[in-house]
Image (spheres, rainbow, N blue to C red):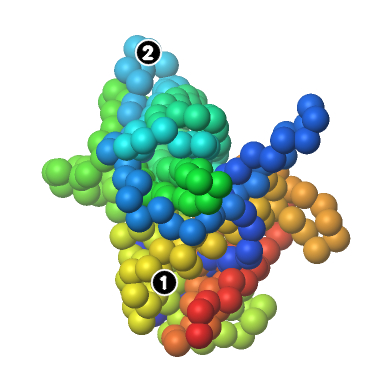
Amino acid sequence: MTKAIYHTGIVLLIILAAGVLWKTYTDAKVQTTLQFFPFHADAKFNETNTSLTLKEPDKDKDKYEVILNVSSVLDRKAYLRQDMSLLFQNGRLVDLLKSWKRDTSSMDQTLTIEGHESSLFEAVTIHYAEIHEDDNPKSTYKTTDATQYVISSRFGPIKSFQTPENEEQKDWAFTLKSVANSRLTKVLDRYIDKTQIDLSDYTVMPITQLTDKKDELLAEYEDEEQRAIIEKLWEALYSIYVTGIKKQDGTIIDPIDSTIPLILREKQSSRLILLIQDKTGNLHEFYQQLPS
């Protein structure tokens, strides 16, 4: 694995124990956490969706709008339903969705953002349900993701695609991926210079690729163990990223404009590393202990 590894998605993922997207009520104040409970083996999501679409741009204008839609339907009413989605543009967090509902089975959210330049948009979502039966809370989840390439060029109309289908689209996809990869590779290079690790000993991937490549990261774990590890990872991500990046001195930095969190694991290591560069350029690393 080389420093150019992020061409397949390099982002160090740092894991801390946290709690699932969960609401605790105290008088008029509502605090949000993320806490997983024992897995509900019977509850299923009938529908889950994360989609990115380009709104029809106005003629003769150099700006455009991308619409993120996130929805899900559980097969039963849940005590708490929540969908949380992270939206990245060219390797940086540009916006997020995090809404919850009580005593419902379904969620449906939409977010619109404005863009000007050619961009690679990536979204990753966790669909979560907390189910109470006989005073025994359990939970379940599913993840979905989406990718959208938007081409804004003075030589033609604004257009978009999800999967490149011709040579022109393949060229644009390579160019836009390279922009995001270069940004994340620089973050990784800084971390290597700081820690002097040998990258060839590590598996590295961005959070946006975890759903498809979890077996590569956690090869020796069974499905149930992988699920528990990923639950803890999302709990951590919510705690130390979504609600603000926590510095050692206790200061909290808005995660917007920070890099895609990278997950890094040394071969056969019993921990994961989550690496993030905030909008001021500072690196943050967090750790999650894996089952022995």
From the viewer's perspective, is 147 left or right of 237? left
Front: mark 1 or 2: 1
Note whether residue 72 is visible: no
Question: Mark 1 or mark 2: which comes first in sequence?
Answer: 2
Side of 261 where 107 appears, left or right: left
Q: Which residue is mark 2?
A: 58
Q: Amino acid at mark 2?
A: Asp
How packed mark 1 is, by other alpha carbons closer than 10 Å (few <14, some 14-19, many 20 or more), is some
Read off the residue under disc 1.
Answer: 225
Q: Nearer the viewer, residue 62 or 184?
A: 184
> What's the distance in space between the residues labelled 1 and 2, CA to CA?
49 Å
The spot of residue 281 in percent (x, y) is 68, 56
Hey, what amino acid is under mark 1? Glu
**Residue 65 percent coordinates (x, y):** 43, 24
> What residue appears at the point 72 percent right and 35 percent down from the top-left corner?
25
Count the marks: how many?
Answer: 2
184 sits to left or right of 23: left
